[in-house]
Amino acid sequence: IIMGNIAVFAFVAGNPTSHWEIRLLSRFQENVPVGTLVYTFNAKDGDGSFLNSKIQYSLEMSNMGENLFLIHPLYGTLTTAFPLDREITHSVILTVSAADQAINLTDRRLDSLAVKIAILDINDNSPSFTSSPHSYVMEDVEVGFLVHHIIAKDPDEGRNGQVTYRILSGNENKAFVLDKITGTVTSLEFLVLSQFLDREIQECYSLTVIALDDGSPALSATQVLTIIVLDVNDENPVFLKQLYETAIHENQDQGEFVIKVEAVDSDAGNFFMYSLIDDTFGAFAINSSVFTTGPVTQLEKISIIQLLIEATDGGSPTLSAVTSVEVHVEDVNNYAPQFTKVMYNLSVSEDASVGESVLVFSAIDYDWTHENTYVEYSIIDGNAENLFSVETSVMESETSYKLVGSLVLSSVLDRETAASHHLVLLASNRGTPSLNSTATVLITVLDVNDKPPVFSSPDYHIHVKESIPVGSHITEVSANDCDAGANAEISYAIISGNDRGHFRLDGKTGSVDLMKTLDYEDTMKFTLIVQATDGGADVKNVAFSVVLVSVLDDNDYAPLFLFPSLSCIVSENLPTFSFVCAVNALDFDKGSYGHLTYSIQSSCLAHREAPRDHDMFFIDPLTGDIHTKQMFDYESQNRYCLIIQAKDKGDSLATITVQVDIEGRDEFDPVFTQDQYFFNLPEKNEAGQLLGRVTASDSDGGLDGVVHYSLLKTSPFFSVNQTSGNIYLTQTVHRNKNGSKRNDDDTLELLVRAHSPKIESKFTVCTVLVNISNSPESYPIVSAYSLTISVSMSPLSVPNSCGFLCKSHSQVPDNQLDQFYCFSHKICQ
């Protein structure tokens, strides 16, 4: 079966009961995507049960290490598992097996099919050059000479692997042409065209050649072919000059250079041999340069010598050229001018006038020509500041003349800048080459008192501690005078800033010493004006400097809190970082020792854990402001105590005790133990009897957590104890004679409020129901809902003992005697 470029050949083998259906599929390329469906295999099994007829497919490859295909075990679909490449694999033989899934492995039956897949080619490879990109050819080859062989290969098959060639660029002068193309591996020949090669015109050709296959679309590759043209000796040497001219001195020594000649030609790599055709007097020789071979004094009377020089190349056959050299013999300047003295010594005052001549000198030259005997003078060393110049004048006599030089002052001298000058004078003639000689001039500059003293610093900054002992050395001032001798002797004095005589200045050494005790708190800084005077005889020069003495503070005083302790009150539930209070200590030091830092050291409550108090606060180390680090809870802790430390830079310190009391807030409502209380009125009741007790609690701390009781509305029959919550009768209650049945009038309702002693505190109300059905039947009773009488009852605080002896103990339980209202006219005598 042929599928595109994949050919499948199937061979049926195995169990004759198997049945295979093979059909022609659509075409595939060798570069089909991974996962492409190749074929679907279908096996039949005649068994009836599910497992005996259930077929599973498997695949084996007999000639490949890597499986290029996958088969679905249930559906039998054969797909590509990896990219296919015909150039690597031309065909694949697969064995497809189909097996049923009988429960017992020994009962399972299977059949196999051998499949051969041939992968067909597509044009997926470009040609590649295998021939060398370089070629060499002699420049004198004939037209039609074979220059180079080009080979390119393409691994594709058929037309996809057939290669043709073209020259793309580099052959603009048509020097080369392609000759023939043969087979799948193509040979390419370059032929020289009508014109001959000339290396001297072009020695290298760079051709871009393209190789194209015959596929669709065509693929190609390019190669840059470099053709080197090799040289042939076909060019005559040529001298750079037809006539060379030079000059030599009359006293030229043996072996000295005269002139260099040079010949060239366009051929490559030629080496030239030079020779003299006419060696006049045997005084010259040549390699690439002409040089002397012996004394030339014999040539003094000859002004021009003519030399003929031949250059021969090293080619085959050899080629040559001839040139001429004119050598001019010149007179020599044999003598240098000589100074009449080798060294001149002189002294000049530093206030000498500009333009003044300080020295006259001369030199003698024994040459006789004007050029060789004309002497010029100059300063060649020691005159970098151009303080001196040379002037020349002519001194004539009857038989000769002489040039005389004068050393002239060009700028003002300054002995303090340079106390002496070392000049080198040069005398040179105008000969060729010029000859010269030198002389040394030593000039000593004499001093004038023209410089004032100069302090080593315009101001001296001195720091001393206030505790420095009297007599201590403070500093030393120093001035320098550039003058010499007595003009440079300096004396010192304090002319200002020492009114109270704290300091003494040594007039000779400049040493400053302490004469009185310093006190930083009194004077922190002294400004001394110091004068330096030189020792000039006629005029004295002075200079001034400032000595700034800064007194450094000693730690004279320790920090001090005005009070040993401080109390602060803050509310609970303050936000974090809230201000609590501030501590402030005094330090009478004025300098850095007066700067204090504050810190929390520990807790001062013995029963508290110090880290807990410390963790609740932080203090600003510079201002002493105390702030909260956490929120306060009155119910958890209502008092903190801190030990705050104030410390100066000298490690002196003071402490203060800070007590922080937390002020509670009414956060919680009172809570009754019951929402409703039920009490029965005794059958025989009278004023002062205890009916029952209501109880409430409050989670607040302090006064906010104290519970007081009161009636929300006053009652003519009942009252409630403010602190205990006991409810008492205030008068006898009678029920209605005619009412034998119980109804709403048999029950009285009281509303009792629980609250703290503070004004406008949180409160809670509970209901108290009193059953009065057992009361005496004498007087009508007024319903609690229609009662409009307003009676103000003030609760009585009863001590732990009434103070009277009660007759009837049975009326009041023993455990309620301390809260029982004692009515002396009713119960107690």
Image: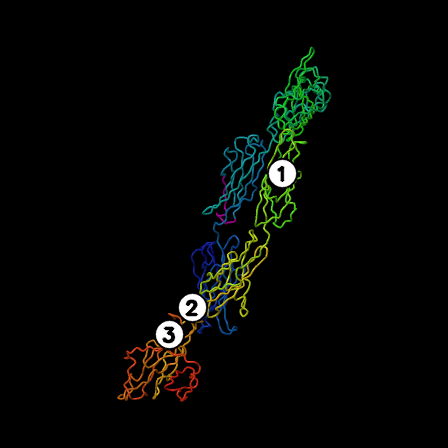
Q: Which residue is mark 3?
A: 764
Vertical relation: 209 (above or below) 636 = above
**Residue 383 circle label:** none
Residue shown at the point (53%, 53%) measured from the top left: 88
Amino acid, disc 1: Ala
**Residue ID for mark 2:** 665
Residue 802 versus residue 272: which sits nearer the camera?
Answer: 802
Can you identify the residue that label 1 sits on?
493
Q: Amino acid at mark 2?
A: Arg
**Under tag 2, what secondary structure?**
loop
Amino acid type at mark 3:
Thr
Residue at 43% from the left image edge and 71% from the top image edge: 703
Which quadrant of the rendered structure holds the C terminus?
bottom left
Q: Position of residue 138 (x, y in %)?
A: 59, 33
Chain-order first, disc 2 or disc 1: 1
Please give the range of residues in magenta. 155-166
Crowding at mark 1 (Cα within 10 Å: few <14, some 14-19, many 20+): some
Residue 587, can we see it? yes
Residue 732 on the magenta span? no
Furthest residue in direction left, as rendered: 738
Q: Residue at x 64, y 17 (%)?
A: 393
Q: What percent of the width, then of the height, locates residue 479?
A: 63, 37
- Assign a secondary structure to mark 3: strand
Element at label 1: strand
Looking at marks 1 and 3 on the same chain, the residue that comes earlier in the sequence is marked by 1
Gap in angstroms between the C-alphas marked 2 and 1: 77 Å
Q: Are marks 2 and 1 in contact (CB under 8 Å)?
A: no
**Residue 157 falls within the magenta-colored stretch:** yes
Colour theme: rainbow
Q: Quadrant of the N terminus?
A: bottom left
